[in-house]
Image (cartoon, helix red, strand yellow):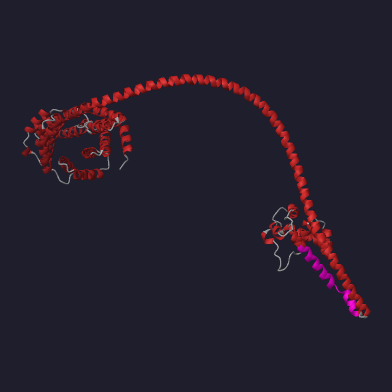
Amino acid sequence: MVPQDTTFRYLYQLIENKETYMSQKENKISEIRKMFETPGINAEQRYNINLKLYNEYKTYISDSAIFYVRENKEIAENLNHADWIYESRLDLVSLYSITGMYIESIDILKSINNKDLPDWLLVKYYDCYKQLYNYYSYNNPYTLVHAEKSKLYRDSLLNVLDKESNHYKIVYAEKLDDENKLNEAKQILQDLLDKTKSDTHEKAVLAYALANIYKKEGNIGLQKHYYAISAICDIKNAIKENASLQALASVLYETGEVEKAYDCIKSSMEDAMFCNARLRTYEVSQIFPIIDSAYQENVNRQKSELQLFLILVSILSAFLIIAVIYVYRQMKRVARIRKELYRTNVKLNELNSDLQYTVSQLNEVNKELSDVNNELSEANQIKEAYIGHFLDLCSTYINKLEKYQNTLNKKAVEKKLDELYKILKSREMIDNELKELYENFDNIFLHLYPNFVEEFNSLLLEEERFILKPNELLNVELRIFALIRLGITDSSKIAHFLHYSANTIYSYRTRVRNKAAVPRDEFENMVMKIGAIKKN
């Protein structure tokens, strides 16, 4: 189901633009009228054209519809066509009932013998009687006999209608409604409405009937919703002989929606007068003054509120003018103060710039001092570490030399010259001492820079990183760059310490730089920044 708010918004848009659908109706009627211009049309064709015009005008302009039905009656009598004569007379009854010509309607119906009518005209006959007495009972609210007669003719109508037709189901639902069998009536009408996809006149009838049932049940929301759907279909089909708009206006008025009620009842009155539907005009005239009075009362109240609002706005405007003048003076004063502040701020900015420059200079000097201090601190720690180990090594080497001297003296005294010559010629002691020297260097260095290997590898490409053998602390390449980290960058000194040639050391350094993941020119500087000395 479409939300009610959406339905109502759409309805009010249609009310404002209903002339669009009237224009469409007029265009359709004009197209039918053009059929009269067909050369050589006969009476039968003219009858059918008039019948189409009657169907278009019936709920649009009743006087025009009467005109074409009367012409058809004349054609039928000239042709002596019995069925057409009865059809045109019954069509006149339907129109006379709408325009309030009840006596004329009754006279015509009494002149017709229903036994002479075929089934399809019998439906019209009983429908005209039902409609006539139903309308007449509205104008005679104390004459219940007319309402009862309408119900009797409704029963007769049900007996001749096809029980599978929508016409039968609509009339039967009306009967159930009168008998207060609301659920059954509602189910029939809802099923028919669900099957009706387009906004036809029949959909308007179904929605109006459903709204009347919800009215009996006291369901105001659904009552308004279905009246609105019915009104939408009536407007889109340019149905001027309608009841839904004035019924919706009554509900809206009862729920306090006076402005919307006024729009609906005004449109309903316009439609009734346009169509010359006396019953609808009578119905609307009963409620229009009430809604109009409430609407005018609302308008007057809104005018009073508007006048009060204008007075308040005038007072506020006066205060606003005073405030503007006061603000203007204050702004001039503020502008003057701002100028003074600006000049002061310029001077402060200049002083601040000078101060920032001085601070930046001090920060640079401080950073340089801090770097020098860190380097001195690091150098002191390296010096302390290596001096201590150096003294230990000297003592160890003195002991070893003393022991070595004793061994040589012993061999000389014992005159074991061959063994003495063999010992003097052997490099085993030198190699062992160098190995021990490098192990001591590696231990001391890694004690100072425990993460050197990991950080050094991080400067290399992943596939070029060094993987040490088991029990190996540093390899040759790492030992070269360990010496560089200690500040020994001269390849000759490194070569002397490691017992390699200077060219070999240079080759090692170049080869490792080529494996760097960082810029080659910055590689050794970055090695110099590796790690922090581990403090005891």
In the displayed structure, would residue 164 be above or below residue 306? below
In the displayed structure, would residue 480 be above or below residue 200? below
Residue 343 in percent (x, y) is at 67, 26
Residue 136 in percent (x, y) is at 13, 31
Q: Which residues are magenta?
A: 418-443
Question: Of residues 45 and 113, which is closer to you in this image?
Answer: 113
Question: Of residues 56 and 450, which is closer to you in this image?
Answer: 450
Q: Would residue 499 be visible to someone looking at this image?
A: no
In which quadrant is the N terminus drawn?
Answer: top left
Q: Is residue 97 magenta?
A: no
Q: Main secondary structure of the magenta part?
A: helix
Q: In the image, 55: left or right of 494?
A: left
Residue 155 in percent (x, y) is at 11, 41
Find residue 220 and report its image quarter: top left
Find residue 211 and report its image quarter: top left
Find residue 341 and report its image quarter: top right
